[in-house]
C-alpha cells in the first residue's frame, strides 16, 4: 500500500503545473484557491482520525505562522515560474528542496556530506546549468521561469526547516493542515496586491488542484514517507518530471532537446542520490517533496 501511495502521490503532484496553466485566475490566486479549498478538508480529516490540531498546537502558533508565510512564498514563486518555463523544468527545480534540506543538515551538524551526496550536488549543479542554459537560449522568459521555480525550491526548504520543530509535537496531518491554514492570508493579500484576477469563472482547475495536488498528492506522500526508505522515495521522484514532461509535450508541445534530457537526468539522479547517500536522515517536514 505504501508503494502504491508513493506512485499515486508523484503522478498526482506532476499534474499541479498543468492545473496552474489552465486556471483562469492569476498564478498566486491559483495557489490561494489550492490551499483555501483543501485546508477545511485537511482539518476535517485530522479531527476525524482523532487528532485535536488546535489544542495540540498551543505554543506553536507563531512558528506555524512563519511556516505558513514561507509556504505561501514558495507556492507563489513556483506558480509564477510555472507559466514562464516548461512543465518538466518547473517540476525539477521545484523539487530542489530535496537537495537543499540535506545541505542545511550538513551545516547544522557541522559535517561534510558523504561521497554519494557530494556526487549528487555536483550532478545537480551540472544538470541545472544545462537546463538553464537551454532555457536562456530559447528566451529570457524561460530562464526567468527557471529562476522563480528554483527560488520556490529554496523557500520550500526553509519551510521544511521550520516544520521540523512543529513535527516534534504534531502528527503529520494536523501539522500540514495548520501550516496550510496559516498560508491562506498571505497568498490572498499577495494576489490582490499584484492585481491578479482572484475570482474564477471556471472552477474545475482549482478544484482539481486542491483535490489532486493537495489532498491526494500530499496525503499519499505523507503516508508513504512514514513507511518507505529515502532511497525508494528518491527513486519515485523520477516519476514527477517524467509525467510533467509528457504532459508538457502532449498539451503544450514542449519538446525536450538532448541538452534538456541530459540535464533533467542529472538533476533526477541527484534527487535520488542525495536521499540515499547519507548515514543520517534529517527529520522530514509535514509536506511532501513538491510540488508546492
Image (cartoon, rainbow, N blue to C red):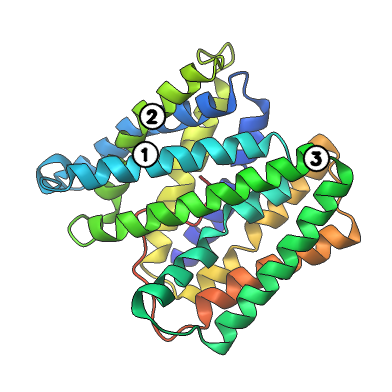
Query: Position of 41 compared to 122: left or right?
Result: left
Residue at mark 2: 186
Query: Position of 41 compared to 228: left or right?
Result: left
Identify whether 92 is placed above or below 195: below
Residues at marks 2 and 1 touching, judged by CB atoms closer than 8 Å: yes
Residue at mark 3: 140
**In what element is the residue under mark 1?**
helix
Give x and y (percent) for residue 185: 35, 26
Residue at mark 1: 69
Q: Judge the density around disc 3: few (<14), some (14-19), many (≥20) Cα neighbours within 10 Å.
A: few
Front of the two marks 1 and 3? 3
Residues at marks 2 and 3 touching, judged by CB atoms closer than 8 Å: no
Q: Quadrant of the N terminus?
A: bottom left
Q: Judge the density around disc 2: few (<14), some (14-19), many (≥20) Cα neighbours within 10 Å.
A: many
**Which residue corresponds to the image point at 67% horizontal and 26% vertical from the top-left?**
22
Give x and y (percent) for residue 130: 80, 61
Amino acid at each position: 500500500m505504501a508503494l502504491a501511495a508513493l506512485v499515486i502521490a508523484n503522478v498526482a503532484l506532476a499534474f499541479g503545473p498543468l492545473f496552474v496553466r489552465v486556471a483562469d485566475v492569476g498564478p498566486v490566486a491559483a495557489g490561494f484557491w489550492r490551499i483555501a479549498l483543501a485546508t477545511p478538508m485537511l482539518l476535517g480529516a485530522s479531527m476525524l482520525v482523532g487528532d485535536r490540531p488546535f489544542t495540540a498546537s498551543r505554543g506553536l502558533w507563531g512558528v506555524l505562522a512563519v511556516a505558513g508565510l514561507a509556504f505561501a512564498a514558495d507556492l507563489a514563486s513556483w506558480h509564477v515560474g510555472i507559466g514562464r518555463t516548461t512543465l518538466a523544468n518547473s517540476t525539477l527545480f521545484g523539487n530542489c528542496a530535496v537537495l537543499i534540506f540535506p545541505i542545511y543538515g550538513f551545516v547544522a551538524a557541522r559535517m561534510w556530506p558523504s561521497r554519494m551526496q557530494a556526487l549528487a550536488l555536483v550532478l545537480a549543479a551540472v544538470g541545472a546549468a544545462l537546463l538553464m542554459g537551454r532555457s536562456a537560449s530559447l528566451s529570457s522568459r524561460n530562464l526567468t521561469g527557471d529562476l522563480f521555480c528554483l527560488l520556490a525550491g529554496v523557500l520550500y526548504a526553509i519551510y521544511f526547516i521550520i516544520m521540523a520543530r512543529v513535527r516534534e509535537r504534531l502528527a503529520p496531518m494536523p501539522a500540514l493542515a495548520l501550516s496550510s491554514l496559516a498560508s491562506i492570508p498571505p497568498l490572498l493579500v499577495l494576489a490582490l496586491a499584484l492585481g491578479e484576477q482572484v475570482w474564477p469563472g471556471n472552477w474545475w482547475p482549482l478544484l482539481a488542484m486542491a483535490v489532486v495536488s493537495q489532498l491526494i498528492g500530499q496525503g499519499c506522500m505523507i503516508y508513504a514517507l512514514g513507511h518507505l526508505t529515502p532511497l525508494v522515495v528518491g527513486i519515485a521522484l523520477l516519476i514527477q518530471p517524467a509525467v510533467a514532461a509528457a504532459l508538457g509535450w502532449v498539451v503544450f508541445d514542449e519538446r525536450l532537446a538532448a541538452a534538456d534530457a541530459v540535464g533533467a537526468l542529472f538533476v533526477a539522479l541527484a534527487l535520488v542520490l542525495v536521499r540515499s547517500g547519507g548515514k543520517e536522515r534529517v527529520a522530514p517536514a509535514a509536506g511532501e517533496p513538491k510540488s508546492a
